[in-house]
Amino acid sequence: MKKVKVAFFDFTCCEGCQLQVANMGEMLLDVLDLIEVVEFREVMSEKSNDYDVAIVEGSITTSHAVERIKKIRKTAKVLIAYGSCAAIGGINGMKNNFKLKEIREYVYQKDAKHFDTIPTHAVHQVVPVDYTVPGCPVYIPEFIQVLKAALSGLPYNVPDNAVCVECKLNENECMFDKGVTCLGPITRAGCNSWCINNGNICYGCRGMVSNPAENGQKDILEKHKISLEWIENKMNMYNKSRELGELK
Amino acid sequence: MGKYVTLKKSDFNEFIEKLSKIKPVVAPVAKGKKSFAFAEVTTGEEVALQYIPTILPPKKYFMPQKEKILEFDKKKQDWTPILEYSEKIIFGVHTCDLAGIQSLNIVFTTKPKDINYIVRKDKLVIIGLECNNYCDEHASCAVMDNHLPNGGYDLFFTELKNSFMIHVNTQIGDEIIKRIKLFQEAKKQDFQQLDDLRAAKRKIFKDEVKVGHEGLKNLFDKSVKSKVWKDIDSRCVACGNCTNVCPTCYCFDVKDDINLDFNTGARYRVWDSCQNENFAKVAGGESFREDRGSRQLHRFMRKFSYPVEKFSRYFCTGCGRCSRTCMAQINLKETINALVKEKK
């Protein structure tokens, strides 16, 4: 099989998801048998305008980034939104909690006028995306799944059921039973309840299920004496950009 | 009446140690504050003799959450069926879970027979453990008629004052008794204690809902248009907890996974849930059960109506796991009582 040319790009993010590629260990060697990495800022200095697959990390937060992602979309045959920032806006979406002008001045102070900024958008809110790997950071087994799907031209759908499903199969004690609030019931599965398996709560980094049953969720909050405002704050840590439509 | 032996409580630790030398032993162990799970043990101290139903039922040993069923090689046009199994002794199975295993046995041995299940089941030794009292308020084992042993085990332990009374039900069970040599013959006073215990249990365990065993099917059959499902629809969050923890839910999905060589790979069977958003979705994007109320109705019908028609048996064991685990406090006993109330 001819090697597929793959380029990694980063927008507003910590580049930690790309670092996960380096953490793959031995499997990385198998992956490198299939792909030729032509651009990857974290590991090489070469750049390229000739690639089949673009793996995009980070959210779109400036008009310059809008132009850049449009260009990448034009060149790439396949575009993969990689990591929470690219998939759902992620942590950067917290910017959207504030008035744009105010937050810009708060961050850049007197130099604010030199720094262009737009509300935080997920990649799919700006250009069409073929595959999505949510997660902060991405869960490598899922990335491998997506890579395999992309290279063989098959679709990959991020599961649309709650993290609770996987968490139960892993037989974890429920965080709510421990008296801790967890976003598992509204967050999309696919990470094999990675955080809860390791004693942490679910922070909702994979985005919300498409049909999260608002009333039912309110009952749960009431049962556990959790205020709506508090849980909204928790949800908005990763999911604030969901409120935006496509970038016009 | 069968064969009965006794085991001194002081010999219990040694029993588990010796048992684990025959085959790996799994038993309920404490997990966190108020949860339990079946896990491998080598000493009696690890075993939680007083436990409420485990997070997942022992179903996980009979049909694992993820099971490889075949391997394939595209270039060679070759596929090999795979049968995954392991020898185990499951100690401490409550009567509700014994009923669950019996239900699964019926499903998977009815045509089309499931060879993987049947082979795996035959590698598992089951040692039951009697509940002398209710585990908690969620149990409804009496109305489901599962509070007393109804078979389905190799050995069955009942805790008496200073000893365990053990019913030897199969040859496999008998071999274990002979091999471990810690047991005494059951005496008259042991039988008396067992009889007293069962008599006391008959007083403690009463129908937990406002309808009797026989009336349950009819209640559900006539409930299809009930408002109760509308209420449940607004509360359910479709997390799928209720079906995943159910000892008789057996729905699965089959998934292929190709290796990075894009040639070899494997096919897996994984648990699925009728509560999941996409479970009843078909080509074209239509879903047969779009709202959560209809999915919950379906779940209840799969316990109280359909299996009665197909297998002459309720598929609710009364273990209470679905109520215990529900994020939204949808409660089996309350649901049944609400249907009864509405009917009146």
Image (cartoon, coloured by chain):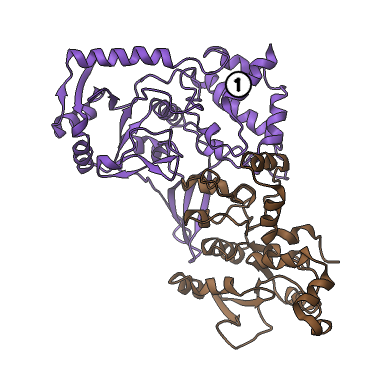
Q: Which residue is drawn at 35% across and 11% down?
A: B199
Residue B1 in sight in this render: no
In the rendering, what colour is chain B?
A: purple
Expressed as whole percent of the image width and height from the top left, the position of residue A67 reads 79, 78
Q: Quadrant of the C terminus of chain B?
A: top right
Give the residue displayed 53% in from the left and 19% down from the top: B308
Kindly identify the residue that appears in the image at 24 percent across and 43 percent down.
B43
For residue B74, side relative to residue A114 (left or right):
left
- In the picture as drawn, the residue positioned furthest to the bottom comes out as A45
Q: Is residue B178 in view?
A: yes
- In the image, is A137 to the left or to the right of B70? right
Which element carries disc 1, helix, strand or loop? helix
Q: Exactly how many numbered labels are in the figure?
A: 1
Relative image position of residue A206 (x, y in whole percent): 63, 58
Q: Which amino acid does label 1 sit on?
A: Ile
Vertical placement of B6 versus A37: above or below?
above
Residue toward you, A51 or B342:
B342
Q: Which quarter of the figure has residue A16?
A: bottom right
Image quarter hosting the N terminus of chain B: top left
Instruction: Name above or below for residue A74 compared with residue B180.
Output: below
Could you say where residue B19 lies in the image, as x and y percent from the top left? 22, 38
Chain A: colour as depicted: brown
Q: Mark 1 points at which residue?
A: B336
Residue at image point 56% right, 46% down: A164
Frontmost residue, B223 versus A26: B223
Give the percent coordinates (x, y) of residue B55: 46, 39
